Image: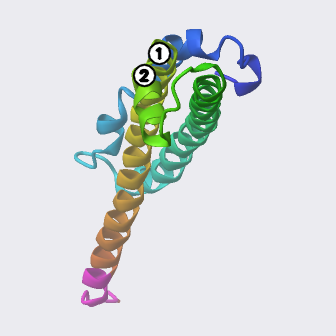
Amino acid sequence: MILTKLSEETLLEDVNSIVEFYSKQIKDWKQNLKLDGKNIEIVNIQQVSWCAYYDELRAQVKAIYDILEMKVNQVRGKLFLTISQDSSVDYSDRAKERIIDDAPEYIKVYRKFLEIKELYENLQTIVTQFKNRAFIINNIVQLRTASLQDETLYYDK
């Protein structure tokens, strides 16, 4: 999914397909994270590519997250202004905030935002797990290298 294909006007309608698309992209992340039965050389090669792949997805979702966060703030601001200008009652700012929290337009936008936020936080967790995996791989390689230093080489004549 390329961000330039998304339009701000249809973004709210596209949230479900965005979440579905990225969920398919990350569905195998736990299998990709496993070290069991994998060669150290292959694991080292895959580590960089998997980490970069999931980090790229995270960055893409972060951009969508930021756009939706702006949309939430925009809707909130418009509703605040509308309540301030059009209401015959002089509500306190706190009361206006409670009215906005109950407004269907705000709830719709905020729910979509929360879906993307959850996806973004999942991707952050995945990237963190792959970074932790890199430390584990490094430790394994260092331990294996250290054990080789104890080996005595013999020269047969």
The prevailing secondary structure element of the residues shown in magenta is loop
Q: Tag on residue 91?
A: none
Q: Quadrant of the C terminus?
A: bottom left
Number of other residues with Cα within 10 Å of mark 1, as a class: few under 14, some 14 to 19, many 20 or more: few
Q: Which residue is mark 1?
A: 108
- In this image, 61 relative to 37: left or right? right
Whether label 2 touches label 1, CB < 8 Å: yes
Secondary structure under badge 2?
Answer: helix
Q: Residue at x 30, y 47 (%)?
A: 38
Above or below 7: residue 73: below
Residue 19 position within the rendered picture, expressed as x and y whole percent measured from the top left: 47, 20
Display colour scheme? rainbow
Q: Amino acid at mark 1?
A: Lys
Q: Residue at x 71, y 13 (%)?
A: 9
Query: Which one is in front, 10 or 20?
Result: 10
Distance, label 2 to label 1, CA atoms, is 5 Å
Residue 118 position within the rendered picture, expressed as x and y whole percent measured from the top left: 39, 33
Most extreme residue toward the right is 4
Above or below 56: residue 26: above
Secondary structure under badge 1?
Answer: helix
Query: Which one is in front, 41 or 57?
Result: 57
Q: Tag on residue 111?
A: 2
Q: Which residues are magenta?
A: 146-156
Query: Which one is in front, 154 or 4?
Result: 4
**Residue 32 position by quadrant:** top left
